Image (cartoon, helix red, strand yellow):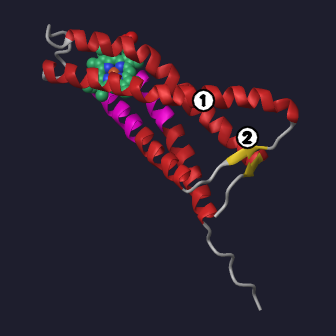
Amino acid sequence: MRPPPAPYTAGDMAETINQWAVITIVLSGIALCVGVYFIRSGNREWHMRAMLTASALATIFLVLYLTRLGLGYEKRFAGPEAWRGPYFVLLISHIILAAANLPLALVALWNAWKGLRNAGTLNNIDAPAARPFFNRHRAWVRWTVPVWLYVAVTGWIIYLVLGRWGEVVTRG
Ligand code: HEM
């Protein structure tokens, strides 16, 4: 007789949520690069679409991440001792910059939104009422884009490291 299937635990659910979280943060990083490409090639409409997509994906990531935390699921580094120090530098820089990314992205979006409202259309961004907002948008995104990318790439690296050398702390 076949043994009964193993019950689906809260830990399994947290693992699945974790996988989707890393997928969404990596996709948001890709959408971000696509958005930068569009603005560099002068395509404002598609720049806006790509950046709104990147923001939506990052929001989904945040919800998944907080859900996983709520389930009390965590993994601890249990790899080679020599890698513990570098891993923690990566982890701590990732956490600090992930927290910084939220206000950076919100201010960038807020200025783009106010600029667009005052311009009326994306063909009119040099209108006097809109220009200051787009100037601020440009100034903020100089920091937002590299921070966002760093968070997406390191999030993915941490996921891979913990997949190989992670030890589950709590499992339901
Ligand atoms: C958080 C999401 C966003 C990021 C990270 C972002 C990033 C960028 C970047 C890197 C540039 C080029 C800056 C430069 O030339 O130095 C830019 C310019 C621009 N963005 Fe965004 N963007 C975002 C959202 C938006 C949205 C939603 C809109 C639409 C309302 C928008 C409209 C523009 C426009 C019109 C420019 C050109 C500004 C100018 O030529 O002065 N952006 N953005």
| 73 relative to 45 in the view: left or right | right
Q: Quadrant of the N terminus?
A: bottom right
Q: Position of residue 158 (x, y in %)?
A: 67, 38
Q: Which mark is residue 94?
A: 1
Type of amino acid at the residue the image marks with label 2? Val
- The magenta-colored residue range is 28-56
| 71 relative to 83 in the view: left or right | left
Q: Residues within 10 Å of mark 1 (few under 14, many from 20)?
A: many
Q: Is residue 166 visible?
A: yes
Q: Is residue 44 visible?
A: no
- Is residue 31 highlighted in magenta? yes
- Distance CA(mark 1)–CA(mark 2): 14 Å
Q: Is residue 82 above or below residue 27?
A: above
Q: In the image, ligand 1 is in what quadrant? A: top left
Q: Position of residue 155 (x, y in %)?
A: 60, 36
Q: Position of residue 88 (x, y in %)?
A: 72, 30
Q: Quadrant of the C terminus?
A: bottom right
* The image quarter in which residue 150 lies: top right
Residue bearing the label numbered 2: 161
